[in-house]
Image (cartoon, rainbow, N blue to C red):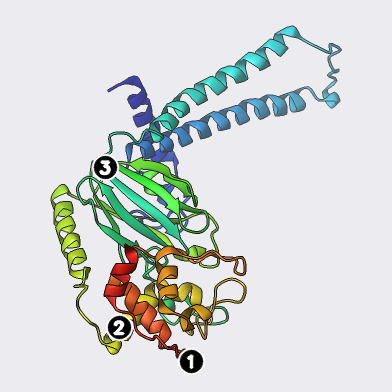
Amino acid sequence: MTYAKRLYASLYAMAACAGIPALAADEVMGRPVQYQLNLQTPVTGIGHEIYALHTWMMVVCVAIFLAVFGVMFYSVFAHRRSRGHKPATFHESTTVEIAWTIVPFLIVIVMALPATKTVIAMKDTSNADITIKATGMQWKWGYDYLKGEGEGISFLSNLSTPRSQVGSPGVAPTEKRSDTYLLEVDNEVVVPVNQKVRIVLTANDVIHSWTVPAFAVKQDAIPGFVRDTWFRAEKVGVYRGSCVELCGKDHAFMPIVVRVVTPADYTAWVGKEKARMAALADDPNKTWTIDELKTKGEKVYAANCVACHQANGQGMPNVFASLVESPVVLGAKAGQVDVLLNGKHSGKYQTAMPAWKQLSDSDIASVITYTRNMWSNKPAENIVQPAEILVARK
């Protein structure tokens, strides 16, 4: 074991003893707990280094505090005027000047060297076993497995905490909140243990931030830019985080859940996900009935659209467009298909409509059909088939 690793190990042991997690409630892996006064228990090498650095910096700061204020208080108490002491008459001392320049410089160097090593390691995303693209959007995450085992898997990850636990302004929740309240999703990111996972980040609309404290990972997702980070989880389990960049009214409702599994379980999950995606690839030649499309479209709308456009389709004035008697919904269906596939930016509304290409052809066709046959909407073209979406993608 190298000296640096021995230092980190000893500091981490110190942190475990002095970090006061014992005052917290029983730990639930991968999420904050009540009365927790220190960082979450890390499960990555970088996380352990950051935990140790945090403890080391605190020790240095406390030592400086005790030394400086100890000398100051002793001087004030022991050399007070009431005891007959007289103030010194000198106004400068070359020795003191040199000392208080060199000593802080050495302290900064001792603190900076291990921190620099860790920062450089945090930025090294090379030689990843798996690469996953995470796209932030209001208010959910989209994931695409780009390289490695699982390449081609794609899904959206939405908050799964029921609204009955959340409540609403002026209305109390009607259901007891779970231990994972606001930190649970319908589709978790799944990765194998002890493999390097690179996360490539961007956003569809505003700035988001992909953060999982147990991995010591926090990286902003910025529209028009590609950022990246990485982690290698050393322990099987479920780890939770959330968007930590204020991104709009439902900022609190876009959690991140990463399930770390054994390599064998990961291979099994990949097979299951690819089978699911194959099942979602509907036969473009199939003709759906309007009732089938409306039934499916209602579920797609509830999962992806209701946060912005509301259950009644009214949207929010000057923020999100209303779908009730909307010119887009009442107009030619090709226009609405284009908006779903490519998004729309408008100066009239504060928030742009993101592209939804990650949805399947049947998802897009059904949600368009649903909105065209809901509320008071009665357009001339009231049904869209998956085959039309397939053609529009080309």
Residue 129 falls left or right of residue 320: left
Image coords of residue 25 (percent x, y): 40, 58
Amino acid type, label 1: Ser
Q: Is residue 393 shown above or below 113? A: below
Amino acid type, label 3: Glu
The residue lying at 67 percent from left, 29 percent from top is 69
Q: Which residue is mark 1?
A: 376
Image coords of residue 170 (percent x, y): 57, 81
- Label 1 sits on a secondary structure element that is loop
Callout 2 touching callout 1 (CB < 8 Å)? no
Decide which of tag 2 and tag 3 comes sooner along the chain: 3
State whether residue 346 appears in this view.
Answer: yes
Which is in the foreground here, disc 2 or disc 3? Answer: 2
Residue 234: assigned label: 3
Cα distance in 3D space between marks 1 and 3 = 54 Å
Q: Which residue is mark 2?
A: 293
Amino acid type, label 2: Leu
Cα distance in 3D space between marks 2 and 3 = 45 Å
State whether residue 43 appears in this view.
Answer: no
